[in-house]
Image: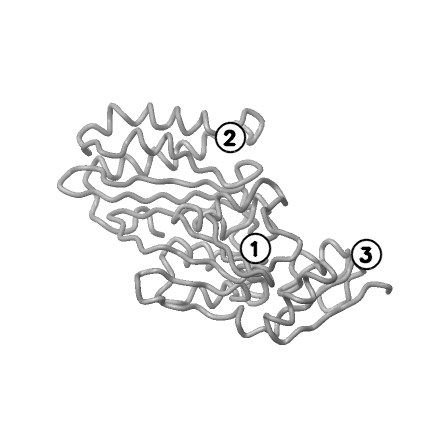
């Protein structure tokens, strides 16, 4: 095997190696093992230098920043996210449903984001919540909306000298929250389709309404244009606005991005969430199993 393997123990060391070699990053390895066509526990045969970053403490942990925001380190695994009482509900729900237990204990949030798979579980709720990704290099740090960072299937705005340090999730207080994932089967399920939605209603007025859909196209779909159709209106107006919203949402999806049955299923889930608000459902989680 001709590739070089680096195992830094600090972020500073990792950033230097990344800049000098452009080494590919390896943490959980759930995706890179597939690329190397080898089983878990075996050394993947890869044609490029690899940097194993699992020993870097600066990339680990979940932090309450004291201003309502939460930072999740890039090496944090789904099982930790799912069990945290400070991580927003949508993200915890998605993390808890990520495939088999072995995957939830080895995959990382940084890898799930950096891989930019349309079927990745965590980017979808993170984009709903306007989460930002923190990118580190020897030149410093920069932050950008995750929705802007993921450019398309397997494509991101990560520079050759950068490492994903973590994700910052803003504070939200939703009146209604919804999450649904549809997979081939409950165990080991890779998303065929997932949807998150949330709304803030005050004195009968829709202050905020948002939705995001995963595994529906080359990247997570969120239509702020569609959301604005409902924002600022009264709940009593939802029956007459619902179709305009659903049409605008459908228009946001490129014609060949998803089969018709997925469009139909997404529409039904969004319609269900809106109908529950119309009927005056109790504030909280809608459609919880």
Using the image as rendered, state which of residue 122 and residue 52 is in the foreground: 52
Report crowding for label 3: few under 14, some 14 to 19, many 20 or more residues within 10 A (C-alpha).
few
Residue 218: image location, x then y, percent: 58, 37
Distance between the alpha carbons at the discs numbered 3 and 1: 22 Å
- Residue found 36% across the figure and 67% down from its top: 64
Marks 2 & 1, CB-CB < 8 Å contact = no
- Residue found 62% across the figure and 64% down from its top: 28
- Residue 261: numbered disc: 2
Numbered disc in front, either 2 or 3: 3
Q: Secondary structure at mark 1?
A: helix
- Residue found 47% across the figure and 58% down from its top: 167
Q: Report the residue marked by disc 1.
A: 112
Marks 3 & 1, CB-CB < 8 Å contact = no
Q: Residue furthest left?
A: 203
Quadrant position of residue 209: top left
In the rendered structure, the answer to whether residue 115 lies left or right of residue 252 reads right
Quadrant position of residue 32: bottom right
Q: Report the residue marked by disc 3.
A: 47
Q: Quadrant of the N terminus?
A: bottom right
């Amino acid at each position: 095997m001709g590739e070089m393997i680096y195992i830094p123990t600090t972020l500073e060391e990792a950033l230097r190696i990344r800049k000098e070699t452009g080494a590919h990053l390896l943490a959980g390895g759930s995706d890179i093992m597939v690329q190397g066509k080898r089983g878990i526990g075996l050394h993947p045969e890869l044609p490029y230098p690899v940097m194993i970053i699992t020993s870097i403490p600066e990339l680990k942990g979940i932090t309450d920043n004291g201003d309502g925001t939460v930072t999740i380190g890039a090496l944090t695994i789904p099982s930790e996210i799912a069990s945290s009482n400070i991580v927003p509900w949508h993200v915890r729900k998605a993390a808890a449903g990520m495939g088999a237990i072995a995957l939830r204990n080895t995959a990382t949030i940084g890898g799930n984001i950096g891989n930019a798979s349309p079927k990745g579980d965590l980017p979808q709720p993170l984009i709903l919540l306007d989460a930002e990704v923190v990118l580190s290099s020897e030149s410093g740090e920069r932050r950008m909306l995750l929705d802007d960072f993921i450019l398309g299937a397997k494509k991101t705005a990560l520079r050759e000298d950068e490492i994903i340090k973590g994700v910052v999730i803003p504070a939200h207080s939703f009146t209604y929250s919804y999450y649904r994932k549809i997979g081939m089967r409950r165990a080991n399920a890779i998303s065929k389709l997932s949807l998150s939605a949330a709304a803030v209603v005050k004195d009968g007025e829709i202050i905020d309404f948002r939705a995001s859909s995963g595994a529906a196209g080359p990247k997570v779909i969120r239509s702020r244009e569609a959301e604005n159709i409902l924002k600022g209106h009264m709940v009593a107006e939802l029956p007459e606005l619902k179709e305009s919203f659903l049409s605008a949402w459908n228009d946001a999806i490129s014609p060949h991005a998803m089969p018709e049955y997925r469009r139909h299923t997404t529409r039904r889930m969004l319609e269900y969430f809106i109908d529950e608000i119309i009927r005056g459902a109790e504030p909280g989680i809608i459609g919880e199993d």
